[in-house]
Each structure stands twice: as structure tokens, then as C-alpha cells.
């Protein structure tokens, strides 16, 4: 018998990426998705309007507040949150199926969602907190991104006050100064997490095969 990487059946994991708004988590997630076809993004549902460059079904599923409430009542969300009067939720459908077939999922969600998932799906969740190099740079990025009023940018920065202290709860910390370097660091985390023994669902069977071979040889 010869083992190779295809001998393993692997359960996928959920990569939770959180950060204060404007630190660059969405951009990093996009870069990973472009380069790694084994990673899929969970597309959240929100009741806020789309920004000028955002597309329905790609960046978010944009719904009315009424529709969001209906989905909530129907139990359609794995987790959901409210930020600045806007609601966001992760659709439940397809998450388990995706993990079962060995695909990894990226969730770009806030610290409340991150905490909930770490507690409720501990073994399936790997969490990364992205820090901006400075708050000045974070503010600058929010201004350049467009789509938010000056008041909304101040609100987002104010929220960061309660988000920064959550960083130590996360498994990994990455500073997003140079975008390519930050993305490479998150990719290294993904590579390492794919090799964790708990993800290999047929590991006991493969070990038995090696033990049998050992018996034959000895
Ligand atoms: P978040 O999802 O954390 O709110 P975004 O990914 O939307 O942040 O990034 C905010 C803005 O900053 C975007 O316009 C993005 O293009 C830009 N940006 C992201 N990372 C960097 C970086 N390393 N250097 C400069 N600009 C960046
Ligand atoms: P934005 O309006 O900038 O797209 O997102 C605001 C915040 O909501 C970000 O921190 C973003 O990660 C978070 N968010 C987006 N979708 C979800 C979701 O489905 N669940 C949770 N918990 N947070 C989300």
C-alpha cells in the first residue's frame, strides 16, 4: 500500500475572518477565493442597500427588512447579527454538505458571529482577526472605499472600540499592511489547518492498513 494525499478523506473547515470595518478582511477573502478553488465563500444575507460596486448574489444577498424578518422566523440562519441598525445573517443551507465533501468555507463576519460560531462549532472553525496597521490608515481606507457617509464612517470607527479587544479570542492575528503579504499569511494558515489530524475522517482506517502491512512484513 502507498499512501498519498488523495488517500485521505478530509472534512472541510470554516475560516472565520473578522476585523473592524475598513481593515481589509473582505479584500483578503476575495484574493484567497480567486487563488484557491477549494475554498468557497458563504454569501451573507443583509437588509442594507448595496454599495455602488456591490452585486446581489455575489457580495451579499440584499433583501428588504421584512424579508429578513421572515427568514429569521423560518430559522434560515446559522447565525445572525445587527450592526448599526443593519442586519446580517449566514444562511444555514449547504454549510454541512460543503464541509462533508472536504471543501472549506470563508465567513467574513463580525466579532459577535465569530464568537457564536467558535462556541457552537468549535472543531469546524478556524478564526483569523485582521488588524489595520493604524486607525488613521483604516479611516483612510473607509474613505477611499466610498459608499459610506462621513457619519457612517465615524459610526464604524466607533464600533472598532468594542471590536479591537476581541482580537485575543481569535486563533490567529494578521496585520493587513501590505495586502499580498497579509493574504499569504492567511493562505499559510489554511494550508496548515488542512493537515490537522481531526480533519482526516478516515485516518483510523489508513492507520489500520499500515498496521496490517507491518504485520505482513515482520
Ligand atoms: P473590510 O471588509 O474589513 O471592511 P475592505 O476589504 O472593504 O474592508 O477594505 C476597505 C478598503 O481598503 C477597500 O477599498 C480596499 O480596497 C482597501 N484595502 C484593503 N486592504 C488594503 C491594503 N493592504 N492596503 C491598502 N488598501 C487596502
Ligand atoms: P458591511 O456593511 O461593511 O458589509 O459589514 C458590516 C459588518 O457586518 C462587518 O463586520 C461584516 O463582517 C459583518 N457581517 C457581514 N455578514 C455577516 C453575517 O452573515 N454574520 C455576521 N455575524 N456578521 C456579518
Image (cartoon, rainbow, N blue to C red):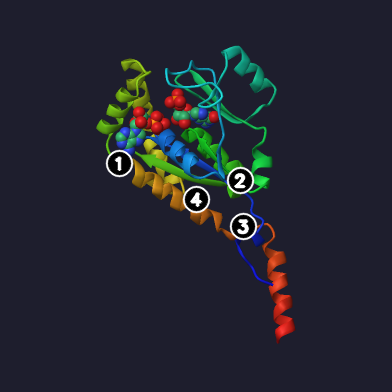
- The tag on residue 198 is 3
Drawn side of residue 146 relative to residue 213, left or right: left
Q: Secondary structure at mark 4?
A: helix
Which of the marked residues, 4 or 3, is nearer the chain's N terminus?
A: 4
User: Would you place residue 98 above or below residue 68 in this image?
Assistant: below
| Marks 4/3: CA–CA distance | 15 Å
Which of the marked residues, 4 or 2, is nearer the chain's N terminus?
A: 2
Which of the marked residues, 3 or 1, is nearer the chain's N terminus?
A: 1
Which residue carries the number 2 mark? 103
Spot occupied by residue 73 in the image (x, y as percentages of width and height):
68, 21
Q: Quadrant of the C terminus?
A: bottom right
Which residue is at a point 39% across and 40% down the rendered structure image? 130
Which residue is at a point 57% across and 16% down the rendered structure image? 63
Q: Are marks 2 and 3 in contact (CB under 8 Å)?
A: no
Q: Are marks 4 and 2 in contact (CB under 8 Å)?
A: no
Q: Which numbered mark, 2 or 3, is in the foreground of this view?
A: 2
Drawn side of residue 72 relative to residue 178, left or right: right
Which residue is at a point 68% across and 57% down the rendered structure image? 201
Cβ of mark 1 under 8 Å from ligand 1: the answer is yes
Which of 195 and 39 lies nearest the eye of the viewer? 39
Which residue carries the number 1 mark? 177
| Marks 3/1: CA–CA distance | 33 Å
The furthest residue to the bottom: 218
| Marks 2/1: CA–CA distance | 29 Å
User: Would you place residue 19 above or below residue 151 in this image?
Assistant: below
Please indicate, yes or no, whether residue 95 appears anywhere in the rendered image. yes
Which residue carries the number 4 mark? 190
- Mark 4 packing: few (<14 Cα in 10 Å), some, or many (20+)? some
Amino acid at each position: 500500500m502507498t499512501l498519498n494525499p488523495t488517500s485521505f478523506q478530509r472534512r472541510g473547515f470554516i475560516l472565520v475572518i473578522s476585523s473592524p470595518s475598513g481593515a481589509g478582511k473582505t479584500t483578503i477573502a476575495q484574493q484567497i477565493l480567486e487563488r484557491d478553488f477549494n475554498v468557497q465563500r458563504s454569501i451573507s444575507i443583509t437588509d442594507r442597500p448595496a454599495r455602488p460596486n456591490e452585486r446581489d448574489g455575489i457580495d451579499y444577498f440584499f433583501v428588504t427588512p421584512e424579508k429578513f424578518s421572515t427568514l429569521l422566523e423560518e430559522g434560515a440562519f446559522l447565525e445572525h447579527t445587527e450592526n448599526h441598525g443593519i442586519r446580517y445573517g449566514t444562511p444555514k443551507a449547504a454549510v454541512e454538505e460543503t464541509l462533508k465533501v472536504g471543501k472549506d468555507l470563508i465567513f467574513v463576519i463580525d466579532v459577535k458571529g465569530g464568537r457564536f460560531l467558535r462556541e457552537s462549532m468549535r472543531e469546524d472553525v478556524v478564526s483569523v482577526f485582521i488588524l489595520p496597521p493604524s486607525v488613521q490608515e483604516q479611516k483612510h481606507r473607509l474613505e477611499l472605499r466610498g459608499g459610506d457617509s462621513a457619519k457612517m464612517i465615524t459610526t464604524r470607527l466607533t464600533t472598532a472600540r468594542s471590536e479591537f479587544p476581541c482580537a485575543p479570542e481569535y486563533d490567529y492575528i494578521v496585520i493587513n499592511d501590505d495586502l499580498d503579504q497579509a493574504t499569504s499569511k492567511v493562505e499559510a494558515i489554511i494550508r496548515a489547518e488542512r493537515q490537522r489530524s481531526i480533519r482526516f475522517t478516515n485516518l483510523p482506517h489508513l492507520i489500520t492498513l499500515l498496521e496490517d502491512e507491518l504485520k505482513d512484513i515482520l
